[in-house]
Structure formats: C-alpha cells, structure tokens
Image (cartoon, helix red, strand yellow):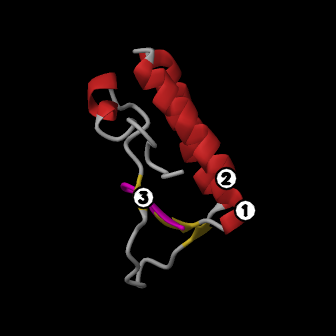
Amino acid sequence: MIVRIPFEGQFALAEDAVDRLNELDNAAVAAVEAADEEALRAHLRAIHDYIVAEGTPVDPGDLVVSDVIMPPPDATLEEARADFTGDGLIPG
C-alpha cells in the first residue's frame, strides 16, 4: 500500500503493516463519530507516526499512485468527516 503524507512524501507499507494501520484508522472513525476532536487529533498523529516508522519512503522521482492520502494531523472534525466515515481511509 502506498500512503501519501502531504508535504512529506509517499511511503510504502508492507501488507502486514496495513492491519495495524486499519486499527488506527478505525479509532479515528470512532473519534469522528463521537465528535471528539482531541481524540481525533491524537489518532491522526498516531497514524502519521506509524506510517513514517513502518513505511519505506518512496523515491520522489518515482511516479507512484497513492492508495491513501493522509489528512493533516491538525484536521478539524468537520474536515475529517469526509475521510473518516464508514470504513475510513483504509477499506476493510
């Protein structure tokens, strides 16, 4: 899976890392559904940190389509509602 973090680049995540990313994504969905902006921001930061820690940076010269584009870690509830509904960013 290729994830783009705006202003930081793209990261390739191994298939076994996607399950944990999906768990973090589901927590962000729950925070949006609960209208808990503080929890949402904590989950967005955790998602960001996980992607950077577990992902392999994609060479900026490589043209690769992103499977997911992360919202900014300071996204508001209103901004996040478009991304974190239903399955969230990560289907499944």
Range of magenta residues: 1-9
Can you say whether 26 is above or below 50 in the image? above
Q: Which mark is residue 16?
A: 1
Q: CA distance from mark 1 to mark 2?
A: 6 Å
The answer to whether residue 78 is above or below residue 55 is above
Q: Is residue 56 left or right of residue 39?
A: right
- The residue at which mark 2 appears reads as 19
Residue found at x 41% / y 24%: 32
| Residue 34 belongs to the span the image colors magenta | no
Q: Earlier in the sequence, mark 3 or mark 1?
A: 1
Tell me the residue at 44%/48% (across/down): 89
Image quarter in which the N terminus is found: bottom right
Q: Amino acid at mark 2?
A: Asp
Q: Kindly identify which residue carries mark 3.
A: 68
Mark 3 crowdedness (10 Å alpha carbons): few <14, some 14-19, many ≥20: some
Q: Nearer the viewer, mark 3 or mark 2?
A: 2
